[in-house]
Every structure is written in C-alpha cells, then in structure tokens.
Amino acid sequence: MGSASGHRKKLTEVVAHWFDAPSPIDNAAVLADMRAAGAPDEVLMQFEKQRQQQERFDVLPQNWTALEWFLEVSDLWRWRSPTLCDGFDWLQIEAESRLSQCQYSKDDFKKLKLMGNHARLLINESLNE
C-alpha cells in the first residue's frame, strides 16, 4: 500500500474508526449491566475480548504525527448551525500550533486536512440522519 491513494484511504479509515469508536464509559456500563444481570464469566470475557479488538486499530508509522495532531485538535470545529459542521477552525489550529511551538510538515498538514474533511462528512451524516 505504497501509493498516495492507499495512504489517503488508510487515513480516512483512521478517522472513521475515531468517529465510530465506542466510548470506554459506555463499554464499562454495558459490562456492569451484564454482570448485574448475572451473565456467565465466559460471556463477560467474550465481550471484553471483542471490545479490545474493536479498540485496536493499526496506524501506519508515517501517519502517526498527523493522527496525533488530529486528536489534539479534534475539538476545534466550526459550526454553521447545530446540525451543520463546516470543518476545522483553521485559525484556531494555527494559533494552537504556534502557541504550543509545534512544528508540522506540509505533508502532515495535507494529512490533517484529509482527516478533517472526512471527519466533517461523518459528523454531518450522523447529525442529519
């Protein structure tokens, strides 16, 4: 998967995983409910195994910096309305990067843009279902 399109596809898969990943709090509550309902130990162990498999997602080494940057700024969105996300607030991202004195490459920025655009699509789809 050395092609540029292959790397883009992998980055969008990372964003989709980030967007769809269940909250650890939700999983803990489900597990507690299962215990309270008297679920057998083997069922609890199977649930925990499946949860761990869902949480695991491989990231290509060349994408780590962009992923870390994406996770760091994943709360900096611009909203046109409560049900329409315009995407990242690039001025806030630029300010945060400058103030934290983080240096990112042009390639990292391209990856962040790709991930942000894909996340925007997923957010808007979920809000308008």
Image (cartoon, helix red, strand yellow):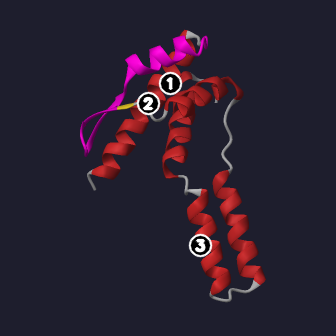
Q: State if disc 2 and disc 1 touch (CB < 8 Å).
A: yes
Mark-to-mark CA distance, 1 and 3: 33 Å
Q: Which mark sits nearer the N-terminus, 1 or 3?
A: 3
Residue that carries the numbered disc 2 in the rendered image? 116
Mark-to-mark CA distance, 1 and 2: 6 Å
* On-image quarter of the N terminus: top right
| Residue 129 visible here | yes
Residue 27 counted in the magenta span = no
31 left or right of 79? right
- Name which residue lies at 67% across and 23% down: 62
Q: Position of residue 45 (x, y in %)?
A: 76, 73
Q: Position of residue 112 (x, y in %)?
A: 50, 24
Residue extending farthest to the left is 81
- Name which residue lies at 42% across and 20% down: 92
Which range is magenta? 78-103
Q: Position of residue 36 (x, y in %)?
A: 64, 85
Q: Nearer the viewer, mark 2 or mark 3?
A: 3
Q: Which mark is residue 112?
A: 1
| Residue 2 visible here | no
Q: Nearer the viewer, mark 1 or mark 3?
A: 3
Q: State if disc 3 and disc 1 touch (CB < 8 Å).
A: no
* On-image quarter of the C terminus: bottom left
Question: Quick one: SS at disc 3?
Answer: helix
In the rendered view, would you say 26 is above or below 10?
Answer: below
Question: Quick one: SS at disc 1?
Answer: helix
Residue that carries the numbered disc 3 in the rendered image? 30
Near mark 3 (Cα within 10 A), the count class, few <14, some 14-19 or many ≥20, is few
